[in-house]
Amino acid sequence: MRVAVVGLGTAGAATACLLFDRGHDVTVLEQADDPRPVGAGIWLQALGQQVLDRLDLLAPLRASSCDVSRVAMAGRDGRPLLDLRYDARRASTPALGVHRGDLFTLLFGAVRARGIPIELGARVTALEPRTGGVALTVDDPGGPDARELGRFDLVVGADGSRSQVRAALGLTSRDRTYRYGALWAIVPDRAGLAGDTLHQRMDGTRRYLGVLPTGTDRASLFWSERTDRFEAVLAAGLPRWREDARALAGEFAPLLDEVTELLPAAYRSVAVRSSYRMVGGGRSAGVLLGDAAHAMSPQLGAGTSLALADAWTLAVALERKEPLPDALAWYDDQRRAHVRWYRWWTRALTPAFQSDLTALALPRDLLTPVLARTPGVPRLLVGTLSGDRTSLRRTWRLPRDAP
Ligand SMILES: Cc1cc2nc3c(=O)[nH]c(=O)nc-3n(C[C@H](O)[C@H](O)[C@H](O)COP(=O)(O)OP(=O)(O)OC[C@H]3O[C@@H](n4cnc5c(N)ncnc54)[C@H](O)[C@@H]3O)c2cc1C
């Protein structure tokens, strides 16, 4: 099939490689003129690692990352609220603390090594059925007028939480910006203060400091903040921010001194009615994956793993099922319950961590230690974090490749 992959993030790059390897004629369109290896650290779960392994990218990623085998949550006074170890579930694989730039470099390299055509500076704004397939309208901000590109049998919308492909297909059922986001920085951590643990220090629901080991002597810091206060906090300067953050930092205080710049990140909550739509009389289609289909706040560290699971499942669907409508219906069906579990938990948990609902802090701080000691709960939590649950009872596995 002639496939246009819109977006060269994690979902788009992985999909391009997986579809190319299965013999499809793939073109990638990316709005950035010069995509670069930037971004905060990522807590990458076992599910995402499995997909990267199938692309032979896990071993090189491991070389610059580190295991995150524990989550430690504490209150403002340092009192432990949760100490969850991945080995609470037998044979479970620890997460990886990954620099987003390292993951990008590997995926971008994999697309380039395959010789997959990439159009940079190509912002897709619309898609239209034409004789012989779907055409894409591409707007080059630095170039002349919008132009039309294509004909494609399948357009893969991997263009992130503000997806234009999703809008063009009319599939959005929910698209909200969270009131809270994060200011983040990657800092040197030569003393290994972060160890193998994701640390979260909570002060009510309005403030928290997250510390994630990010491999090769680095750590990522996340400072929760209301998005409408980003500007004021940044304008007040780093010394002022350090003063605030020091109240929560405890033994991580030396890392605050390493921060040279804080960068803002906002989160969106996105849901779709269906992840695909047939166009042009049912012969061609658009399909969504990654944040384009299900952006969520990063409380569970699931977004990258879900995006990679989407990419794998779509590749298997196109291999196993024909014609195209059957393959996309199978993809949608495979992904639905799994994505719903993560979306539901993320929406339920986020207000207890990042919101103005300060009354939630006390029940959170009282309940969390009790739940953490309740038999079966740590195992369930680790299963959910690892990325393989669809309900309290059922687990989700990557579908097997076609025989
Ligand atoms: C602060 C923060 C921390 C996070 N932490 C974690 C974590 O610890 N673990 C985890 O698993 N997830 C985490 N996430 C979520 C994770 O980053 C996303 O789920 C993941 O990056 C989604 O990948 P994607 O490829 O779908 O989208 P993106 O990575 O957003 O990629 C979309 C690509 O499409 C391009 N694009 C957009 N519009 C167009 C267009 N119209 N035409 C052409 N190209 C376009 C963009 O330039 C971009 O390259 C975090 C997110 C944030 C904001």
Image (spheres, helix red, strand yellow):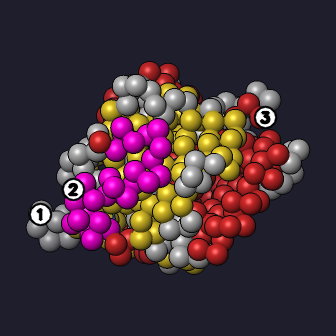
Mark 1 → mark 2, Cα distance in angstroms = 9 Å
Name the residue rendered at 78%, 48% in the picture.
372
Amino acid bearing label 1: Gly
Looking at the rendered image, the disc whose residue lies closer to the viewer, 3 or 2, is 3
Q: Which residue is mark 3?
A: 89
Q: What main secondary structure does the magenta stretch of the protein show?
A: helix
- Proximity of marks 1 and 2: CB atoms separated by less than 8 Å: yes
Q: Which residue is mark 2?
A: 121
Query: From this viewpoint, which residue is outermost toward the front?
Result: 77
Amino acid bearing label 2: Gly
Mark 3 → mark 2, Cα distance in angstroms = 45 Å
Q: Who comes first in sequence, dot 3 or dot 1?
A: 3
Front position in the image: 228 or 306: 228
Q: Residues within 10 Å of mark 3 (few under 14, many from 20)?
A: some
In this image, 344 relative to 169: left or right? right
Q: Position of residue 396 (x, y in %)?
A: 75, 46
The quadrant in which residue 150 appears is bottom left
Amino acid bearing label 3: Arg
Q: Is residue 80 above or below residue 68?
A: below
Inspect this view and state whether residue 399 appears: no
Q: Residues within 10 Å of mark 1 (few under 14, many from 20)?
A: few
Is 343 inside the magenta-drawn segment? Answer: no
- SS for tag 2? loop
Q: Which residue is mark 1?
A: 143
Q: Is residue 287 above or below residue 64?
A: below
Q: Quadrant of the C terminus?
A: top right
Q: Position of residue 275 (x, y in %)?
A: 59, 65
- SS for tag 1? loop
Give the quadrant of ligand 1.
bottom left
